[in-house]
Amino acid sequence: MAGTKSDVEDIGWISIAVAVLALGSHLALESSYWDLSFNAWASAILLGLGPVGGAFYLWDIGLKFGNRQLLASLSFATPVISSIALFLFGISTLSTAISIAIVLIMVGALISNAVPALIMKRRLRQAANA
């Protein structure tokens, strides 16, 4: 891995390490079912190489070059979108606990983006008046 500078190539090594740790944890802590069809194995491998693997690279690029507060807030949108989609497709109910969780996630996202923006505006105003 790169010494002090984080390179995109490091994501591959980190992914391999996480996969090995996950496999070890699975074998040690869970009951295994290895009699999967070719399609199941191919799907799992393609998921790891495609959307899941790609997400690690995009996350790395976003943290290095993007708006970190916005990225963090949008990452919390995943359970909100999942919960709403499960409800809309009739797979799950929209319980009170899920509704409260969705509201709390949205409030947290608003606070994490609005508060730094307000602080920055206040500092700019103070600097202009000084």
Image (cartoon, rainbow, N blue to C red):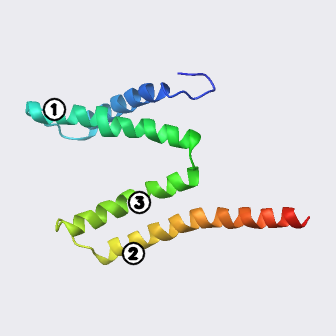
Report the amino acid beneath label 1: Trp
Read off the residue under disc 3: 77
Label 1 crowd (10 A; few <14 / some 14-19 / many >=20): few
Report the amino acid beneath label 2: Ile
Could you tell whether 127 is left or right of 47 in the image?
A: right
The structure residue drawn at horizontal position 26% and vertical position 63%, both measured from the top left corner, is: 85
Read off the residue under disc 1: 41
Considering only vertical position in the picture, is 31 above or below 121?
above
The structure residue drawn at horizontal position 79% and vertical position 62%, both measured from the top left corner, is: 124
Mark 3 secondary-structure assignment: helix
Mark 1 secondary-structure assignment: helix
Ranked by sequence position, the earlier of labels 2 and 1 is 1
Q: CA distance from mark 2 to mark 1?
A: 37 Å
Camera-side residue of 76 and 100 = 76
Could you say where residue 7 lies in the image, as x and y percent from the top left?
A: 54, 27
Could you tell whether 127 is left or right of 32 in the image?
A: right
Q: Residue furthest bottom?
A: 96
**Which image quadrant for residue 44?**
top left
Instruction: Say which of marks 2 and 3 sits in front.
Output: 3
**Which image quadrant for residue 99?**
bottom left
Read off the residue under disc 2: 100
Could you tell whether 6 is left or right of 42 in the image?
A: right
Q: CA distance from mark 3 to mark 1?
A: 29 Å
Instruction: Say which of marks 3 and 1 sits in front.
Output: 3
Label 3 crowd (10 A; few <14 / some 14-19 / many >=20): some
Could you say where residue 75 lies in the image, as x and y percent from the top left?
A: 44, 54
The structure residue drawn at horizontal position 46% and vertical position 56%, both measured from the top left corner, is: 74
Could you say where residue 45 lies in the image, as x and y percent from the top left?
A: 23, 31
Task: Tell whether label 1 touches label 3 (CB within 8 Å).
Answer: no
Report the amino acid beneath label 3: Ala
